[in-house]
Structures are given as structure tokens and as C-alpha cells.
């Protein structure tokens, strides 16, 4: 394992030290709880947005804290959900009287820890709601399983809901919006290489030179199936087809699209992928209203990419274009 | 070893488990690499080191006190799926212990309460390929052997837990991270079931 | 070689197709010449800024085209300088009557091709100046050698000079500023892995699990020397020490600092590195006025990072904070 | 083969060189991996394919016309260091050829002009570990053997070029990308010197 770290056990807290000095103008870090706060949190009268999850997905979530996006992000160990104490500290730290929305990715650990935190916060009478993002079409949804994972839609949702909260919408409205966005968000990902969890010290899985993993999440897990390595054009099809099949909308609609790198794929390849994805959407009669191409929700140094589509209407495009000022996403300010 | 358990023995159990987890952390993480995200060993190791530190720092008058602390410590330090699950287990387990010495039957009641806590949190059933696949047969075996005393009951539980763990290996996971793998999860041993059996084995070695 | 591409010979033109659809609101692509233009180029009366070089360093340079930064970027093959025709097309395409500055990284190929283009452009009476960036302290400077490479300072220089050009400064002023910035810019980089040039099909060099390359450029070349793999703290020292030794300024001064990833190093590690770098600068009595942490000038999927310092005075900080709207760098707008 | 060169032979030279470059592209890139950026083979291959396409597309009345086109084509298609260097070589080379048939002496004059172009562009001297290390001894050997005719001169040039290329291998590079490696560049064969020798060998096989 070759990583620019000092101690595998200390990766998260040391990265937070770096974030704090790099972005001290906009962010504040609670090192005890490993929570990244917007510098001016809590903002009175504004619904607080809290997200969090395992680390290793940078810039998510700490990099999405700031004006027009999150008020706080809880940083768990690498690929490990944070603990309720962290979410509680974040929740009480951002509550400006208008309540707090937890944005939770659908993983057993994340859901349970956020649930425990919400129970604790309710005792202290902060009004807490939560939305669970579950947009990964690689996973069959069913009542009898853990359901779909939360992946790329999380990024777009945090931006969109962040803008809504910034504009003064109520906790009910913000929660409704978040639920609606999750309902029209779909993602699918693939990996060309494994990543190495620092504490594990070796790659999570081995993959041949002629293979890739299709239907991966964001924790360096193996995917739904192993398929032969293929061209960008075919890889795009492998990602877009299952999304199109699953979309609760289609021809004539427009979307916010993201082609996301898993951390180790160069931007030049992501642009090739975006070209392919765009062509497939065009063929399906879907217009891209806005897009992101880059590393937005990653799995350490994994090579690979994912595609996310969120149906866009005028309201969402307006929220998308609203100012955002975070380390990971910034415009309009 | 008598037929009731002292608070000190509970501490021994936890210390022994912490040691066993530390020794087996790489193995647990390896299992979690195959069908999860390669952190179960480090998660449990981090949690049990925190538990040992809590044991050093505090005095505990009763098993109830001790396990309340342990449950809270795990909830606050592990994260992931295993943090809330093991945390809830010990909180509920401790909640049933009462103040006095604990006999085989009382321990059985506490274990069952702990496992019910896991089920409540995680909503897994036997056959979902989770730690529940170890715990469910372990509880049954425990109850069946409890009349023969603590030692017999705990040994039976550990053995049945191991059997349940192994029986889950061929299954396709329906809960937890392994469920995302679909058919590919079959043939792999569940990390949480494995750490649960280690807990039962440590109990058999320290509580009877 | 596992890459999300269609054809190793076609990587650059296909990535440009993706860039065009992703950023069509701000950019225009001349596919024949592989030049990325600012959509509203040429801007009458504004000095045009043209840069370019081999591809594989994304987001540089195409991702730095837009308001407040470059007017055009010429995209060569991967790690290969573009040809004079490209620079000529870019130069005539951005000239708004106020002349054009070529921002050239000091590599034999880049320098010669830009030189030939400038000769050709002068025939067509566009006024052309050029600045050659040579900031890499890993390379001994000497009259008898090719001199130092141009690396990280290029990014900061394009931003700063871009703001100056946007504000209406003359070609002389802009050229003088660029030269001045290059004079106070220093960089040093290291690699943990090689990258694979698509047309070559295999890693440029092999590196053991306990080794790293110190003093690398940005073309996937091996470095100045091979050293044992080390901690983030020591790696930071290996990069910062030679920079400090070489700086034409020091204690009491302030800088714009960049911790840059080579493409395959996750952001979480770059933040750890930034924390270490910041600490070393503090010890040396140097204040960080502004910073960048991320993948800004890369070598495909190479793991590793570089540190760049540019001395900052009030003028430069003002130029830094001025609005910029490019795919790779955006704020204030 | 006579003692003067026809335009068709110049075309043959270029076609043959294109083929040789294509066959040796991987080897040239391999050399460039060790002390450069792993693109010399693909650079030259791209350029010489463009040259072949230009030969197909056009008719050339004289060597001067032909090499003007070739030089421009290389400048416009190769990039990197080798594009301007080989491009300038052929532009200057062609500029000296004149309209009539080319004899051994005239070819020598043209070669020297080409190499002077490389030196003007790249400012390298013998010993800097660049293609100049092949060209400089090649020119000398050519001139010395020119009285014996084209064939002898070109063979001598190719051989001396190879000697120069090999003599540069132990050197530390002072120009081009290899110079960034410092001491580590010693012991590696220079890619550009290698492709230059291939060009001379192709000349010996086609022009005499
Ligand atoms: N819903 C659930 N109910 C019971 N146990 C579960 C459930 N989900 C996961 N587990 C257990 O948790 C283990 C994984 O723990 P760990 O790796 O620490 O957490 P994470 O999956 O969040 O990374 C699994 O092997 C499984 O035994
Ligand atoms: N200044 C120079 N003068 C003469 N030849 C040079 C000079 N710089 C580089 N070269 C030659 O160019 C070759 C490298 O060409 P190539 O790999 O195509 O370009 P680049 O170095 O831009 O990647 C070197 O092997 C060397 O022979
Ligand atoms: Mg985990
Ligand atoms: Mg796990
Ligand atoms: Mg090159
Ligand atoms: Mg080269």
C-alpha cells in the first residue's frame, strides 16, 4: 500500500486538519466529533442540512459544506458510517430553530446510526427529519432486502436541497423536495480497479487486466458482476441502459447529468465518457439541462466512473443555478 | 468458577474478546473485503479498544452498569452497521442483568434480549446472511443446555453459533452490504456472524 | 492497460467532444485544430491569452479557458506538444486587436512549436509575446541545459494573468506580470506510481512498493531520483525543503500555495499533505494568503503530488480573488 | 542505381522510412519511456503516416517541392520536440536540393543544411545526448566518403550515425526531456538519435 498518509488509523483526523487550514475562511472543524461545519452555522431561521457517512468519498461530504449546500458533514472512518454522537453534535450545532434535515445514504450502518442520532436529538427537542437516498439501479429494490444503495444522486440532492434551504424554505418543504429529488434520481457505476482501505492495507478485491466490475457502490466493494473490459462507448451503454430502463420518466424530459470519477480515473477519460453518455441520452430523447463531469463522489483511488441522472424541471434548474460556495462545488459567488 | 457470574468475570469476558478481536482483525477485514467494504476487523478492533479503555477508567458496581457503558462505548466508537448492532446488543443485554449475581437462566434471558435488540435495529431474519444467522441457533442451543449449567450452555451456544455461521456461508445475502453483491455473496462467510461466534467463544472461556 | 477510452489514437479528439457538450455554454471547440476557445473569443480590445501543451494534464489547459483565465488552449497529443498550426489557429482566433500572450511551459517541444507559431503569427501581423514558465526546482538551471521544467506555477499564472488581461491591461503589462509571476513561482513533485500513456499501452516506468520517484515533471517521466516510500510528513518535507532553499523570498512573506494531485491520489491524501505543507511553511515564517488543494495539473492516473508556491502581494491577491469562470476553476461569478 | 538521385527515389526513401518507423514505433517509445515521456515512437509514426498520405495525395516535380511538403507535414502533425526538429531538417534539406538531379556532393550539402536547421532550432551540441550525437559524425563520415559515390557515402553516414548514437548512450543528457533526469539519464540510448539512424539507413537503402 502506497499512500500519502502518516498513520492508517489517523487518516480522517489528519485530513480534517488539512481541510481546516485550507478552507478556514468558509469552514470550521469540530475535531473531537469529526464534524465539518459551515463557518457561520447555526444560521437562525434556516433549516440545517446535515449529511455524513464514511470517509474516502472526497470531496463528499465535507467538501460540500458551505453556503447553498450543507451546514455540517459528519466524517466517519474510511468507508464506515459515523457514530450517533457525531450526528448529534452536527445536528445541535446547525439547528437555527427551523429544524434539521439529515441526508442519509441508504446503507445499513448509515441508516441505523442516523436513526439513533435522530432519537437522541428529538430528546433535546431539535426537530429532525431525514431523507434516505437510494438511487443505485445496480441493486434490485425489495422489501426483503437492504434496498438500493445511495450513491451519486446524493451530490445533486445536497446541492439542490441546499439551495432550497438557503432560500428560506421550511423543514417540511425541504424534506418534501429532498424526497422528490431522490424519487427522480438514478445512478449506476463501474470499476476498473479496486481501492485500498488504509487500515486494511491491501486492495479490497483483485481484478484481471481484461475485467471490470459492473454495478459497484462507493465503498470499494466488488460490483454486481464482473464483465470483460470494454470500450468507453460500450461502458457508457452498460451504465446508461439500466438507468434508462429504470427511469420513472423518459423521452422529452430533461435531466441534470453527472459523469463522476471514482477517484483514480483521469478527467480526460471522464470527458470521453461524458461524450458517450450524452449521445446515448440524446438517442433516448432526453435533454441534459445541466451537467457535472469530474470526481464528486469517490472511492479513494479506485479507477472507474458512475453516471447519475436527476430529472430536471424549471424549479430544479433554478435551484441548481443558485449560488453555492463550498470547496467541492462553487458558482454564482 | 461457580454457577453464577461476578462482575469481574464480565470484565474478563470483554477483555478477552478485545484480545481475540485484535488478533483476528485482519481475518475479519479479509472476510469483509470479499462481500463488504473491508472494515469489519478495524471497526470491531477500534470499538473493543475503546471498551478496554473504558474498563480501565471506571468502576462498575453491577453487570447492568458495566454493559450500559460498553454498549454506549461501542455505539460511540464503531460506526458502520456493527456499531449500532453490537451497541444495542450490550445495552439490551445489560438492561436485563439486574443487580445480583447472574445464573445460567438469567444470562439466557439477557442474551435473548440483546439479540432481540439486534433484530429490532437491523430487521434481519435467519437466512439473510447476517450475524443473526449465528445468534438465533446459539440462543436455542443455550436455552436447551441451560439446565446443565452455565458452562454447558455457553459451549453449546458457541458451537451452535459456529454452525449457524457456516450454514449461512452458501446463502445469498439479503441484508447489509453483502446484499448488494446479489448471487456473488454466496459462498462467502459473513464477517459479523464470525465476530459474533468469537464473542460467544470468549463468553464460554470466561463466564463459566 | 485499462482505460475508459475507445481508441488509444483518438483519446484527445474524443475528450474534446465531451468537453464541448459538457461546457458548450462557456466553451467552443475547434475540432480540426484541437483548440478550446472561450465562447466569446475574440474579445475586442482584450489581450488574448493562449496556452497549450500535451494532453493528459487535465483540467489543464482546456479546463482553464473562460472568463478571467485563458482565451484558448491548444491540445496536443497525450504528453506531446501541440503543433504550430494549432497555436496559430488559437492566436488568430483570440486576437482582439490588443495582441496575444503565449503561456508556454519550458519543454523543448513546447518552446520550439510555440516559437514557430509566433513566427507565423507575426507574418500575419498579430502582436505576439510569450512567457516561458520554468518553476521546477527539481531541475538544476543552467545555460548549458534545457533549463527547468514548467509545472504547477503555470496554473496559478494563468489565473493571475487571466484576471489582469480581463481587467484591460495592455500586452506589455500582461507580459511583464507573467514574467514577474514566473520569477516568484517554485514547484516540486513526487510520484508513487507511473502512469500509462494510451498509445504506449503500458506504464512508463516500474516502481517498487517501497519506492517513490522524487523530482518528477508532469509527463509521467521518472523523477530526479528514486527514494524510499515515506510518510506524508516526510514527503511534504522532501517537496517543501528544496522549494524553500530556492525561493527568492522567505520569512515574513506570504504566498499562494497549491498542493496538487497528479491524478490518481485521492483528495483525502492531498488534504493530509496540505496540512503538512502548511505546517512547514508556518515554521519557515511564510503565510499562506490563498491556496488550492486538488487535481489541477495532472499526469493522467499517476499517484503523487506536487507543491507550488507563488509569492503573493496585495496586487496578486486581488487578481487571485477576481472572478473566474472556467470548468477547472470558478469563483466570483 | 545511378550516381544521381531522382525524385521517385526520395519518395521511396520516405515510404521506406515510414515503414521502418511503424515497425519500430514500440521500440522507440520504449526508449523514450526510460528517459522521456513514452511518445517518440507514436510521434514519429503519426508524422510519417501523414507524410505517406501527403505523398499519395500530391505530385512533386522536384526534391525541393517534395521535402517542403514533407517538412510542413511533419511540423504540422508530430508536435513535441521531434516535430519541429525533423520538420526543420526536411525544410532546410529540401531548400538546398535545387531542381535538377542530385549527386553525392549535392546531397551532402543538403544534409548539412538540414542538420544545421536542427541545431538552430534545438541549440544542442555534440555530447548533449540528442539526435545531434548521431547526425554530427554521420555528416563527417558522409563528406569523407562522398568522393567514392553516393552508396559509399550513405553507408558510411549510417554507420557513423549508429556509432554516435551508441557513444551518447553512457552520457548524461543536457538537452531535451532526458536532461531532467540528470545522472539517471546515463546508460540509456537516446530515442531521437535512434530514429535518426533509422532515417540514414533508409537513405542508404533507397537513394544509392
Ligand atoms: N441488518 C442487519 N442485521 C444484522 N446484522 C447485520 C445487518 N447488516 C449488517 N449486519 C452485520 O454487520 C456486518 C458488517 O459489519 P461492518 O463491516 O462493521 O459494517 P459495514 O457493513 O457498515 O461496513 C455483516 O457481516 C453482518 O453480519
Ligand atoms: N534541443 C534538442 N536538440 C536536438 N534534439 C533534441 C533536442 N531536444 C530533444 N531532442 C531529441 O528529441 C527526442 C525526443 O523526441 P520526442 O519524444 O518525440 O519529443 P518530446 O521530448 O517532446 O516528447 C530526443 O530523444 C532527442 O534526440
Ligand atoms: Mg463500513
Ligand atoms: Mg464493513
Ligand atoms: Mg512528448
Ligand atoms: Mg518524448
Image: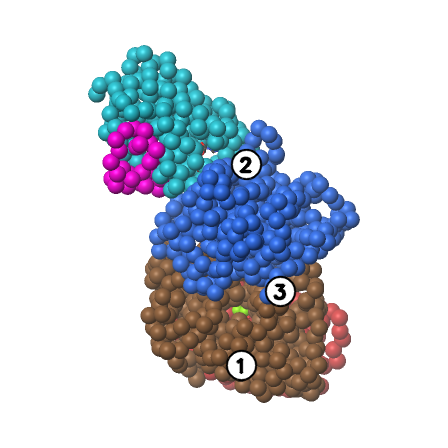
Chain colours: A brown, B red, C blue, D cyan
Pointers 2 and 1 in contact (C-beta within 8 Å)? no
Which residue is denoted by mark 2 in the rendering?
D180
* Circles 2 and 1 on the same subunit: no
Q: Residue furthest top?
A: D147
Considering the numbered disc 1 on the image, is that residue within a helix, a strand or a loop? helix
Viewed as shown, does residue A27 lie left or right of D48? right
Measuring from the top left, give residue A72's x and y in whole percent: 64, 73
Measuring from the top left, give residue A109's x and y in whole percent: 55, 75
For label 2, count other residues whose C-alpha is less than 10 Å away and answer few (under 14), some (14-19) or many (20+): many
Magenta part mainly helix, strand or loop? Answer: helix
Disc ID at residue C332: 3
Q: Which is more toward the observer, A114 or D144?
A: D144
Q: Is residue A87 above or below residue C207?
A: below
What residue range appears in magenta?
D46-70
Residue visible at 41% across and 68% down in the picture: A215
* Circles 3 and 2 on the same subunit: no
Q: Residue furthest left?
A: D1
Which residue is denoted by mark 1 in the rendering?
A178
Residue visible at 47% across and 68% down in the picture: A291
Residue D75 magenta? no
Considering the numbered disc 2 on the image, is that residue within a helix, a strand or a loop? helix
Q: Is residue C306 above or below residue A56?
A: above
Measure the C-alpha gap from mark 3 to mark 2: 38 Å
Measuring from the top left, give residue A55's x and y in whole percent: 58, 66
Viewed as shown, does residue B32 lie left or right of A46? left
Considering the numbered disc 3 on the image, is that residue within a helix, a strand or a loop? loop
Q: Is residue A281 visible?
A: yes
Q: Is residue A258 above or below residue B68?
A: above
Q: Is residue B184 above or below residue C239?
A: below
For label 1, count other residues whose C-alpha is less than 10 Å away and answer few (under 14), some (14-19) or many (20+): many
When asked about the image quadrant of residue B97, the answer is bottom right
Residue mark closest to the camera, 3 vs 2: 3
Amino acid at each position: 500500500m502506497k499512500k500519502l498518509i502518516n498513520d492508517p488509523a489517523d487518516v480522517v483526523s489528519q485530513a480534517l486538519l488539512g481541510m481546516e487550514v485550507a478552507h478556514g475562511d468558509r469552514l470550521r472543524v469540530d475535531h473531537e466529533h469529526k464534524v465539518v461545519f459551515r463557518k457561520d452555522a447555526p444560521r437562525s431561521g434556516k433549516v440545517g442540512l446535515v449529511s455524513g457517512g464514511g470517509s474516502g468519498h472526497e470531496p463528499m461530504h465535507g467538501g460540500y459544506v458551505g453556503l447553498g449546500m450543507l451546514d455540517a458533514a459528519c466524517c466517519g472512518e474510511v468507508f464506515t458510517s459515523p457514530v450517533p454522537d457525531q450526528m448529534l453534535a452536527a445536528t445541535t450545532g446547525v439547528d437555527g430553530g427551523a429544524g434539521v434535515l439529515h441526508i442519509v445514504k441508504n446503507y445499513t450502518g448509515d441508516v441505523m446510526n442516523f436513526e439513533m442520532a435522530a432519537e437522541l436529538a428529538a430528546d433535546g427537542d431539535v426537530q429532525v427529519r431525514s431523507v434516505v437516498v437510494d438511487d443505485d439501479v445496480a441493486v434490485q429494490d425489495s422489501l426483503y432486502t437492504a434496498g438500493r444503495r445511495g450513491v451519486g444522486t446524493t451530490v445533486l440532492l445536497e446541492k439542490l436541497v441546499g439551495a432550497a434551504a438557503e432560500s428560506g424554505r421550511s423543514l417540511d418543504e425541504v424534506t418534501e423536495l429532498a424526497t422528490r429529488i431522490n424519487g427522480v434520481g438514478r445512478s449506476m457505476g463501474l470499476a476498473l480497479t479496486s481501492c485500498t482501505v488504509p487500515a486494511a492495507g491491501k486492495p479490497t478485491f483483485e481484478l484481471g487486466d481484461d475485467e471490470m466490475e459492473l454495478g459497484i457502490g462507493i465503498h470499494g466493494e466488488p460490483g454486481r458482476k464482473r464483465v470483460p473490459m470494454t470500450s468507453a462507448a460500450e461502458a457508457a451503454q452498460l451504465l446508461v441502459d439500466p438507468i434508462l430502463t429504470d427511469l420513472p420518466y423518459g423521452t422529452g424530459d430533461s435531466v441534470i447529468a453527472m459523469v463522476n470519477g471514482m477517484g483514480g480515473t483521469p478527467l480526460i477519460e471522464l470527458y470521453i465518457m461524458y461524450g458517450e453518455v450524452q449521445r446515448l441520452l440524446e438517442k433516448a430523447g432526453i435533454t441534459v439541462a445541466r451537467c457535472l463531469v469530474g470526481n464528486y463522489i469517490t472511492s479513494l483511488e479506485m479507477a472507474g466512473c458512475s453516471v447519475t441522472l436527476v430529472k430536471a424541471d424549471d424549479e430544479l434548474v433554478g435551484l441548481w443555478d443558485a449560488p453555492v460556495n463550498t470547496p467541492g462545488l462553487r458558482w454564482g459567488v | 468458577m461457580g454457577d453464577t457470574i461476578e462482575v469481574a468475570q464480565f470484565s474478563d469476558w470483554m477483555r478477552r474478546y478485545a484480545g481475540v478481536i485484535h488478533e483476528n482483525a485482519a481475518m475479519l477485514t479479509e472476510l469483509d473485503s470479499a462481500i463488504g467494504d473491508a472494515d469489519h476487523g478495524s471497526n470491531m478492533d477500534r470499538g473493543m479498544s475503546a471498551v478496554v479503555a473504558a474498563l480501565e477508567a471506571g468502576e462498575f458496581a453491577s453487570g447492568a452498569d458495566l454493559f450500559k457503558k460498553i454498549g454506549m462505548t461501542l455505539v460511540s466508537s464503531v460506526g458502520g452497521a456493527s456499531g449500532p448492532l453490537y451497541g444495542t446488543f450490550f445495552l439490551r443485554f445489560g438492561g436485563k442483568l439486574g443487580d445480583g449475581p447472574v445464573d445460567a437462566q438469567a444470562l439466557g434471558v439477557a442474551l435473548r434480549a440483546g439479540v432481540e435488540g439486534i433484530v429490532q435495529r437491523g430487521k434481519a431474519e435467519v437466512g439473510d446472511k447476517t450475524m443473526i444467522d449465528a445468534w438465533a441457533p446459539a440462543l436455542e442451543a443455550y436455552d436447551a443446555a441451560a439446565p446443565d449449567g452455565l458452562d454447558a450452555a455457553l459451549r453449546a451456544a458457541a458451537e451452535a453459533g459456529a454452525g449457524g455461521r457456516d450454514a449461512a456461508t452458501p446463502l445469498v445475502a439479503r441484508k447489509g452490504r453483502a446484499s448488494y453483491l446479489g448471487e456473488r455473496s454466496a459462498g462467502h462467510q459473513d464477517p459479523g456472524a464470525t465476530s459474533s461466534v468469537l464473542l460467544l467463544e470468549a463468553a464460554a472461556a470466561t463466564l463459566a
